[in-house]
């Protein structure tokens, strides 16, 4: 069953085209990985799906959980079950992690979570992520190291229990141990009712997370999709060969 | 007597309740010697106070309206009824307070605040204190907490020693005016070594058209004693311009500690020209927590004079300027003794064309070596129409000091709103969360019910302008 279906999605930032026709379908229970060189549009795809105001969708259609995603406000997308783990999470002074998590949970689920049970659940998730409980009373992302910010993103994912979690370069800025902890947690959160889209240019994470589909995104388009072996092909050949493939394709078109 | 309830302006919820007027005495408009004598006679004051009032009136008439800071040209002082006496006498039990006044206070949460373990309540309705109580153990410890009018008569020696010696009637036009027409306010005396554990609370409110409020607060904390005093102000709004020129004098003796917290939420037509000062002796400490909301114009700069070696001050302030408001606020710190230290944390928010102006003074005298001071000002503008200014003046008289200053002016970042919205939080709530987070360093300094009130005020202020 489909969670998201992206048809010919195109976008611009300040008049320049970034996404040039993305087609992608993700079904329940699947883990997808999108790989690609810097500047290919990987993060743009994540931001467009979440509804970042500076990205303009110029063409295409996205159906998420049976609804028109592009028609929804950012908060409505979250309520519908979309989650984005940010590459650069924002610092919000004066708002504690605990308060933020509870507010977000209330908004996404529509029910104010019971304090005691909620705190218990959160603390369990934190311990899985190797996060100290004291982070609950810290201001959101303020003074957090790169790794702490990313763990905090995955903590939010665990708390909000989305239908589709997009992880935008969650591995960047993490040391090896943190990458393991983070992706093992993500793998644990994956189940037959949700889906995960991992965006990365680093295939070492494939040691910890097992994707069903790997996509290669180059110059705003998905140029190839396949199974795990595609990641190995990337490791051996680099992205250049895919770029060339794209050029050949556009020449012959 | 006017009996109609004015509802010409938008309702601002529980902070804007207007009762029909029912006063037994309204002074003639315009300020004359006769009015001053009448005020004094009504209060049955000692002769020295009357003389002080008359002298102040003379000074007031001779002083010009200040031309710096806010534009006061619309302020017609001669047409403000300076003294309005509510139709009730001092009450010591809540049951005896008239129903109408009680309802107003109940909507403002006063009795509840008291139930929640506040040590005492003195609430000012118009110009006189109508309700007052204090825990018995404080009385046993010799703590005096009463309204200022009673204090003049019952504790004349203490009042006479301190009254308007820190803020004199020669300081500026409005301190002179205050000296002439002051009425009501709180008097607290904490004897040597007494620690008042729970905060003392006083609540001021204006409820008469064209009536200025000139309450005087005098607090003396003797050697080694400590006190937390909370003053909350909230006023309904009227179509006539209102003037508030209160005075707060705080005397903090050797090794003593005083925390003075206040949230002022004046009606949008109020000229709030309040003067607040404290003087701190050796190793004493003054802490100000100051929230300025409402009013059309505010000029408010609580001042700490650190005159004893090792004395310290901390000022935490929040100013919220919305549509049509010019709030000129800040703090002054004078280090006039060695090894004194001060911290200033000021935050301002402006929205809807509001103008928040931070004006601060940090002065270190030539003999005050070893001074440490940190001044931090942050401003947040919620839209492109609003204004924010920062004018921190620093005058250092010697080079053996450690002074830090930081000023930041910013806007709410779209990226941050996007981030919060991506977690299911609406745009309006995301903005409110950011604003509440911005003032959190202030709210956490407040007792819980005040923190809740401050957050409610912010929510009220943000309503309808965001989304």
Image: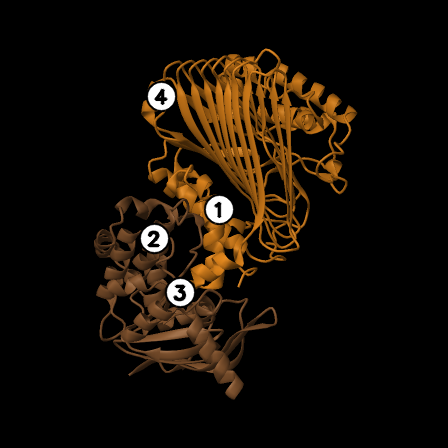
Chain colours: A brown, B orange
Image location (x, y in percent) of residue B197: 34, 27
Which residue in the protein does label 3 denote?
Answer: B424
Which residue in the protein does label 4 denote?
Answer: B195
**Parent chain of label 4:** B
Secondary structure, mark 1, is helix
Image location (x, y in percent) of residue B1: 64, 46
Q: Nearer the viewer, residue B283 or A86?
A: A86
Which residue in the protein does label 2 denote?
Answer: A174
Q: At 71% from the left edge and 27% from the top edge, which residue is drawn? A: B173
Secondary structure, mark 3, is loop
Q: At 74% from the left edge and 28% from the top edge, which residue is drawn? A: B32
Visible residue check, residue B151: no
**Parent chain of label 2:** A
User: Mark 4 Cα within 10 Å, few/some/many (few <14, many 20+)?
Assistant: some
Question: Disc 2, disc 1: CB below 8 Å?
Answer: no
Q: Which mark is residue B438?
A: 1
Both labels 2 and 3 in a single chain: no
Secondary structure, mark 4, is loop
Q: At 53% from the left edge and 75% from the top edge, which residue is drawn? A: A11
**Parent chain of label 3:** B
Q: Earlier in the sequence, mark 4 or mark 3?
A: 4
Q: Nearer the viewer, residue B153 or A53?
A: A53
Question: Foreground mark, 4 or 3?
Answer: 3
Separation of marks 4 and 1 at Cα, in angstroms: 32 Å
């Amino acid at each position: 069953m489909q969670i998201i279906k992206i048809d010919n999605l195109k976008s611009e930032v300040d008049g320049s085209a970034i996404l040039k026709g993305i087609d992608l379908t993700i079904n329940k229970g699947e883990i997808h990985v999108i790989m690609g060189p810097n500047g290919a549009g990987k993060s743009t795809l994540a931001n467009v799906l979440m509804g970042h105001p500076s990205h303009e969708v110029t063409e295409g259609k996205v159906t998420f959980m049976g609804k028109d995603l592009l028609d929804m406000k950012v908060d409505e997308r979250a309520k519908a079950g979309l989650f984005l783990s940010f590459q650069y999470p924002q610092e919000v002074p004066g708002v504690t992690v605990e308060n933020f998590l509870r507010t977000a949970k209330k908004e996404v689920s529509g029910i104010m979570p019971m304090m005691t049970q909620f705190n218990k659940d959160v603390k369990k998730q934190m311990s899985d992520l190797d996060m100290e409980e004291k982070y609950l009373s810290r201001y959101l992302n303020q003074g957090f190291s790169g790794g702490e910010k990313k763990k905090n993103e995955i903590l939010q994912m665990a708390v909000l229990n989305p239908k589709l979690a997009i992880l935008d370069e969650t591995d960047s800025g993490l040391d090896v141990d943190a990458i393991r902890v983070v992706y093992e947690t993500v793998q644990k959160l994956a189940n037959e009712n949700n889906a995960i889209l991992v965006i990365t240019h680093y295939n070492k994470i494939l040691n910890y997370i097992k994707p069903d589909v790997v996509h290669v995104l180059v110059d705003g388009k998905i140029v190839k999709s396949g199974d795990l072996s595609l990641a190995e092909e990337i490791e051996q050949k680099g992205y250049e060969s895919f770029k060339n493939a794209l050029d050949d394709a556009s020449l012959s078109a | 007597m006017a009996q109609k309830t004015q509802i010409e302006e938008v309702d601002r919820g529980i902070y804007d309740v207007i009762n029909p007027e029912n006063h037994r005495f309204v002074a003639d408009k315009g300020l004359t010697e006769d009015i001053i004598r009448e005020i004094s006679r009504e209060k049955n004051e000692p002769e020295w106070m009357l003389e002080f009032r008359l002298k102040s009136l003379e000074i007031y008439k001779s002083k010009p309206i200040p031309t710096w800071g806010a534009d006061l040209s619309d302020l017609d002082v001669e047409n403000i009824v300076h003294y309005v006496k509510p139709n009730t006498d001092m009450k010591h039990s809540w049951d005896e307070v008239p129903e109408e006044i009680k309802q107003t206070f109940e909507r403002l949460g006063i009795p509840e605040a008291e139930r929640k373990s506040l040590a005492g309540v003195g609430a000012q309705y118009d110009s006189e204190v109508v309700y007052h109580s204090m825990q018995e153990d404080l009385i046993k410890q010799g703590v005096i907490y009463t309204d200022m009018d009673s204090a003049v008569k019952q504790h004349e020696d203490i009042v006479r020693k301190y009254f308007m010696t820190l803020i004199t009637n020669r300081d500026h036009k409005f301190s002179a005016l205050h000296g002439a027409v002051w009425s009501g306010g709180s008097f607290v005396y904490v004897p040597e070594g007494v620690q008042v554990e729970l905060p003392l609370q006083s609540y001021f409110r204006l409820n008469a058209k064209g009536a200025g409020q000139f309450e005087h607060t005098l607090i003396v904390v003797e050697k080694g004693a400590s006190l937390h005093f909370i003053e909350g102000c909230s006023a309904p709004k009227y179509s006539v311009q209102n003037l508030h020129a209160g005075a707060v004098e705080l005397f903090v003796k050797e090794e003593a500690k005083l925390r003075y917290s206040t949230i002022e939420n004046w009606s949008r037509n109020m000229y709030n020209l309040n003067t607040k000062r404290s003087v701190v002796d050796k190793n004493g400490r003054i802490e100000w927590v100051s929230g300025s909301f409402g009013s059309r114009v505010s000029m408010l700069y609580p001042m700490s004079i650190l005159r004893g070696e090792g004395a310290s001050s901390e000022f935490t302030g929040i100013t919220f300027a919305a549509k049509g408001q010019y709030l000129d606020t800040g703090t002054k710190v004078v280090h006039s003794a060695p090894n004194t230290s001060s911290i200033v944390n000021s935050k301002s928010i402006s929205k809807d064309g509001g103008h928040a102006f931070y004006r601060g003074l940090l002065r270190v005298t030539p003999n005050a070596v070893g001074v440490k001071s940190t001044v931090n000002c942050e401003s947040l503008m919620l839209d492109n129409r609003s204004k924010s200014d920062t004018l921190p003046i620093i005058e250092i008289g010697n080079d053996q000091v450690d002074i830090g200053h930081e000023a930041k002016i910013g806007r709410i970042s779209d990226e941050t709103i996007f981030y919060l919205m991506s977690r299911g939080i609406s745009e309006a709530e995301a903005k409110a969360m950011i604003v509440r987070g911005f003032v959190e360093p202030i709210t956490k300094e407040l007792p819980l019910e005040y923190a809740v009130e401050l957050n409610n005020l912010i929510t009220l202020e943000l309503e309808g302008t965001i989304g």
